[in-house]
Image (cartoon, rainbow, N blue to C red):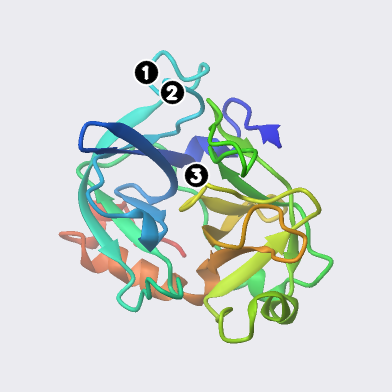
Amino acid sequence: MKEITRRGIIYRFALLEIIMSNMFLLISIGMLVAPEYVLTAAHCVGGLDAYQISALCEPYQPGANCGQPIEEIKVLQEIKHPQYNDKTRNNDFALVKLRERSTITPVAMDQGIISPNYTSNTNDLWPIGVGTQDPDVDKFPTRLYHVEVSYVTQQKCKNQYGASDITANMMCASDPGEDSCHGDSGGPLYDKTNNAVVGVVSWGYGCADPTAAGVYSRISSQVSLLAYIIIVHCESISSCSSSPPSF
């Protein structure tokens, strides 16, 4: 587990705060993929309040974010993938439209040419988030962290979970003792070599279980639909960005 350093790749990611019944704070992660849109997991949305764009460490506020600039932008609309299945977590994607544009450059996403070419030798994949570092201890870090994992082939992941549980819209990754965990949902699986987000933290059995890899929503399988949703939910293409989003 390693800290994300100032002005590193996390500069383009976003921390989400959801206040429920004014009793507790639930933290999840998303990625800024267009000036007005955050990509996260469908199972994370529902009554969202605001995103802290470029969050790095508590208290995630201007002047108190480990020296990194931060923007807090309210949520306007939540858009789940139209074929999201809450039971199977298939198509576990959601786009969240912000009330105003972020001035931070969106993160690049897999345009369908990165993860489809992965092999069992592919590594340097980074799950990033603020999830617990011990699945048996309900304690969360005060800043963003990442671990480094390797791609698990589709067939091997099917063998671990069951053929019907792992769909073409999912991908798996793990390494001994390394995994995303509780509280990382909705965050990125970042390909450091290609400088792009290839997956969204979705589900799995336990954390760092050697018999069950972490499961991520595979961006390449739905990138065209995600781009379409971004365009049609804007008043015009120019209101999303100066040119149509490049996915």
> What residue is drawn where x is 65% and y is 67%?
172
Residue 181: x %, y % from top left: 59, 48
Front position among marks 2 and 1: 1
Quadrant including the N terminus:
top right
- Regarding residue 103, the answer to whether it shows in the image is no
- In the rendered image, the residue lying farthest to the front is 136
Residue 143: x %, y % from top left: 54, 28
Q: Nearer the viewer, residue 71 or 57?
A: 57
**Could you tell me which secondary element the residue under label 2 belongs to?**
loop
Q: Nearer the viewer, residue 194 or 132?
A: 132
Q: From the viewer's perspective, tell me whether residue 131 is left or right of residue 134.
A: left
Q: Amino acid at mark 2?
A: Pro
Identify residue for label 3.
Answer: 183
Q: Does residue 117 sit above or below 60 in this rendering?
A: below
Task: Give the distance between the C-alpha atoms of the residues marked 3 and 2, in whole angstroms.
Answer: 23 Å
Q: From the viewer's perspective, tell me whether residue 20 is left or right of residue 223.
A: left
Identify residue for label 1.
Answer: 62
Residue 69: numbered disc: 2
Assess whether mark 2 and mark 3 are in contact (beta carbons under 8 angstroms).
Answer: no
